[in-house]
Amino acid sequence: MIAESMYQELILEHYKHPQGRGLREPYDAEVHHVNPTCGDEVTLRVKLDDGKVLDVSYDGQGCSISQAAASVLHELATGSTVEETLSVVDEFTRLMQGRGQIEADEDVLGDAVAFAGVAKFPARVKCALLSWMAFKDAVLRSQA
Amino acid sequence: MSVPSFDVERVRKDFPILSRELPGGRPLVYLDSGNSSQKPAQVIDTMRDHLAQHYSNVGRALHALGSESTEAYEAARDKIAQFVGASSRDEIVFTKNASEAINLVAYGFGNPVNTDDRFRVGPGDEIVITEMEHHSNIVPWQLLAQRTGATLRWFSVTDEGRLSLDDLDELVNERTKIVSIVHQSNVLGTVNSISPILARAREVGALMMIDASQSVPHQRVDVTDLDVDFVAFTGHKMLGPSGIGVLWGRRELLDAMPPFLGGGEMIEAVWMDHSTYAPVPHKFEAGTPPIVEAVGLGAAADYLTSIGMDAIKQHERELTAYALDALAELPGLRIVGPRTVIARGGTVSFTLDGIHPHDVGQILDDVFGVAVRVGHHCARPLHLRFGIPATTRASFYLYNTTAEIDALVRGLHHVQKVFG
């Protein structure tokens, strides 16, 4: 029953009730990322102002992990600073790529710590990272 | 007419892996044979025995082991020729897999060294496939079209998951050089009727190829009865090992085709500036072949024959009917493919409302030990046709039971509880 623990209540909650879903105006950059192995995709927009993330809006399709990860990202990033958010993205990436061997830093990750169990399933890591990588890409583009 | 008696419990005892437990004490419920089948002890033992007692390179070693190994390798060719009703053993080419077999044929077309008119392809010529192909029967033809400027066309698929033959006469026409279609869909389970398409191909002088990767393991396939020009299939889906596939081709066409890969064993004589080639099938078997794999595939054909292909087909038909009924009881489950067992094999793909197949597969595996495949199953265009990114696929074989289908259904109820 390892996977049951991967589907944390918080993940299922975000999957069933996604926060901030839907593409919104205005935005500085829009990106489209695809996970070719499973067909999950996300279109994501960011609106930044003066080092702050004003909005992360997204739309896409995919499994519960990929969709919940986008929802959690929206909650964490919106209203926070770009710098803080990018450090959360880095910590989240480190956790996901840690094959379940890494202790998650809950202070940095907040709700995203619920995805810790996903790291034990290499096939699902990309699902969790999809929208987070898209966000990083969108921030870079909007600052270019 | 009665089919030979079939005892699934006795069959299961031949497959050591089916009695293993998964971590956490879960029993294994293997419903992924369309992806790759499990192997009976008869295949495993034959391969082990070859490695332990007879192994050497084939075709070139003059010593005792060389001749034993060659004999076993060529005996495997005989077994496969007999298994699919080839009129000559020389029409059986061993490849790495079905993909290589299809590529081998595709590279025979539009090749400047091939002056046979049937293989000449250029702008204005057409290649016809279907919307329900595995990528292995799409991409090689896309590549051929790109190399030669020919046009790739395809049969569409109906909502029920059958080939639409409405525009057969328009799709297959005087410009068509080859028609290559799947015998049994690896997603829909649909078994395509070959004869109407073949009749049209013959009328216009086009060649015809069948991807039989999903049919040869599950029903009696006789290449002489089919009467097409090329048939590709793979070993690992028919109880044999991975790394070995088969191309059957009409002798006269294989003779007319240029070599595919160059190297050892495929030559007659080599000079620094040119070579002459071995007769078929060796012309197409460059380099040291998958020797032990071929021997294992021969054992797999023997095993399937000993059980009886008609009995296997009948058993899978019963499983499929049982599964189609049982799955229909689940709310929000939509079967992608025919909902009856008519002209259909034991591969059942479906979607569950609001739940992504990856989540379905994860829970089925982790809680119930049920192994299914999730995703687009290397048939992305077919999924695009149905407007879905992915499906969950259960595929049955001779060793599956109705109790395993019950386990699948129980698992799906649980999945709906978790994500509902």
Image (cartoon, grey):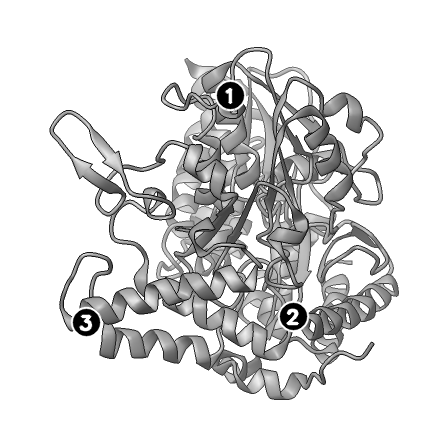
The residue to which callout 1 is attached is B117
Other residues around mark 3 within 10 Å, as few (<14) / some (14–19) / many (≥20): some
Q: CA distance from mark 3 to mark 2?
A: 34 Å
Other residues around mark 1 within 10 Å, as few (<14) / some (14–19) / many (≥20): few
Please, is residue A128 above or below residue B329 in the view?
above
Q: Nearer the viewer, mark 3 or mark 1?
A: 1
Q: CA distance from mark 1 to mark 2?
A: 38 Å
Subunit that carries the residue with mark 2? B
Where disc 3 sits, the SS reads: helix
Instruction: Same chain for labels 3 and 2? Say yes or no.
Output: yes
Hey, what amino acid is under mark 1? Asp
Please, is residue B185 above or below residue B171 in the view?
below
Other residues around mark 2 within 10 Å, as few (<14) / some (14–19) / many (≥20): many
Q: CB of mark 3 within 8 Å of CB of mark 1?
A: no
Q: Residue at x 84, y 40 (%)?
A: B159
Estimate the x, y position of residue B381 in percent, counting from the top left.
65, 35
Estimate the x, y position of residue A20 in percent, counting from the top left.
68, 34
Residue B309, numbered circle: 2
Q: Quadrant of residue B306?
A: bottom right
Please, is residue A135 above or below residue B122 in the view?
below
Q: Nearer the viewer, mark 1 or mark 2?
A: 1
Can I make out residue B353 in this image? no
Q: Quadrant of the N terminus of chain B?
A: bottom right
Hey, what amino acid is under mark 3? Leu
Hey, what amino acid is under mark 2? Met
Q: Residue at x 18, y 38 (%)?
A: B269
Where disc 2 sits, the SS reads: helix
Q: Quadrant of the C terminus of chain B?
A: bottom right
Instruction: Same chain for labels 3 and 1? Say yes or no.
Output: yes
